[in-house]
Each structure stands twice: as structure tokens, then as C-alpha cells.
Image: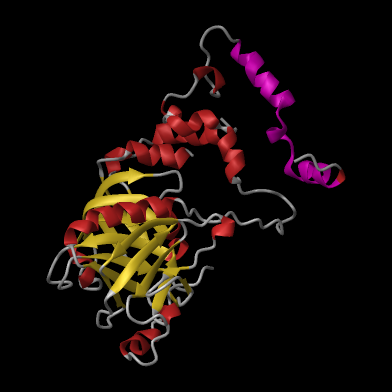
Amino acid sequence: MLFFSYFKDLVGREVTVELKNDLAIRGTLHSVDQYLNIKLENTRVVDQDKYPHMLSVRNCFIRGSVVRYVQLPPDGVDVDLLHDATRREARGG
Amino acid sequence: MVPGLRQFTDRTGEVAGVPVLDTDNGEEMKYVQPGVAIVIANRSPESPGTLYISSRKVVWLSDVDRQKGYAVDFLALSLHAVSRDPESFPSPCIYTQIETEADDDESDKSDSECQETLDLSKVTEMRLVPSDPNQLDTLFQIFCECAELNPEPIEEDEGFGGGNWVFSADQLADNGSDVEAPEWFSPNPTSSIGHSNGDHDIARTVLELQINDQRFEDAEEMERENENSPHN
């Protein structure tokens, strides 16, 4: 639940979602749900030569289980806050 | 691992019929869209057909050939999107990517160009082309809703020393208060290590933690305890 809350906080920011099949999609985070399914808007594919057919896609839904990494905007990462939150989570709230 | 795209011929009813769903196990029809063509991988479009979206899978059935139909579970749909750029595909469509067991296998690329021997289970792309592009946004929305109905099944793998070291969904749900708002954002000061709000003697709090808290016990001791009297 921690990361669900964390990603909800990033809605409206630019992120890059890297899939397990190596496709990386950059876009504005539109929404995220408890399974970490991710909806992006104004997307563009990072490696356009390799995935030319994805060029046209403006919004997309990505299944949480196929996400390998989410690259965050540097100023969206508050290390101290995350430290605190992860400690709390590890203690069971 | 769920299978990818597959043949689907299980129909019931007159004329073209409708797909048979696993209603005994709670599967229900969510949306039906007539007048949809299907494009599998880079094959030519197949039509006319009807798109059926159930709570569990996407089914496309040919309107003219009862033996022709395809299905894919939402569990295998890794991505779906609305594609409107005529340069990438001539007609606006729902573009989907399908997770396959052979994802890393580059050698199947050549196979999929050969229409005769196309192995459906290796297909990684599917396009659904409604005759009326105005339906795309609704379809996209239905896809989103149904995808959310199909979370990853929780793996009940107890084979790792018997320890339940991955949080199961209901354990997580116990922390009900954390679900709604990002409460972690403003941690409760009284429960934070090293925090004192004035009412608490911080030394005592730390002492209590040391004495009472199992988490500070030696890991090996815990393991032995678990063997003798499993309490979790």
C-alpha cells in the first residue's frame, strides 16, 4: 500500500514506465490503482526506432505486473519521507 | 503463467451466437460491441466480427464463420491503448500488447510473418478496430475497468522454509487506514522512532521496544520458535 500511496502522490507528473519486455513509455501519470496498474497520458515511446507503432498512442493502460521500473522525476523523490514511510510500513503501520 | 491469445469457438445460440462464459465461477459479460475487426500481429484485418468483453477476458467472434474466434485473458494483456495515428495504423483502434511465454525469444519473429503457421500463443500484438471510431474511448474505459477486476493471483508458495515472507493481500488489507489517504506522508509522531511529543519519555519508549518487541530478537531464535510452535 505504501507504493500505491506514493504513486498516487505523483499523479500529474512525468514518469517513464519501463516494461519487462524492455518497452519504455514516458508520459504524464494519469492514475494508479492498488495493483499498481498505471494509466499514462500524452505518452511517447522512449526508443522510437524499436517500437514505431507505439508512436501514435496518446494514452495507455499498463498492467502493474508487467512493470519493471518506474523512473520518477527527481524532485518527486523525498528520500527522508520515504525512509520514514518504509520504516512505518515495515513495523506494520 | 496464463496463455496468450488462443482460438475460441465455444459459442451458444442462434446465427452467430455468443461466447460461452464461465458463469459458474462468476464470469459475466461486461460489454458487447458489434462491428469490430481484429488484427492479429501483422496479419490483415479479419471482419466482420463482434467484440465481447467479459469480466475475465476479451473475445472476438466472427459474424460469418462460427469456427472463427479468438480470446485473450485480461491477465495476459500487458498494455492497452487508443491508437489514432494513421501513420502507424490506417484506422483508429484499440492497440493491445499480449504477454507471452516466449517474450524473450526473438526467433519467433520470422514465424509470425508467415500467416499459415502463426502460433497464436506467441502473438504479442492485437488491434481491435471498431467501425465507428467514436467508440474507442468507451472501449478503452471498459478495458481499464475489466483489467482492474483481474489482479495478479497471489502465489501461495510456502516452500521457502514455511515462512510467509511475502505479504498477502489480506494482511495488507489489515492496515485499512493506510489504504485511503497517503497517511505515510505525515507519520504519527508518537509511533516514530526517535520522536517525542513531550508526553512520552523517549528513553522508556526505547526500553519498551527493546524488551517487548519480537522484531529485535535474534533471527535464528525466531526460526526455532516457529518450528516448535508455529504461531503465524
Of residue B34 and residue A6, the one placed in the foreground of this image is B34
- The quarter holding residue A74 reads top left
Task: Give the x, y percent position of residue B61.
Answer: 37, 73
Task: Give the x, y percent position of residue A86.
Answer: 50, 36
- The quarter holding residue B67 reads bottom left
Image point 47% across, 56% down: which residue? B28
Of residue B183 and residue B129, the one placed in the foreground of this image is B129
Image point 32% across, 44% down: which residue? A31
Is A92 magenta? The answer is: no
Image point 58% across, 54% down: which residue? B154
Of residue A13 and residue A90, the one placed in the foreground of this image is A13
Residue B57 visible here: yes
Q: Which residues are magenta?
A: B201-227
Task: Give the x, y percent position of residue B210.
Answer: 70, 25
Look at the magenta stretch and give its main secondary structure.
helix
Residue A22 visible here: no
Task: Give the x, y percent position of residue A14.
Answer: 24, 47
Is B207 magenta? The answer is: yes
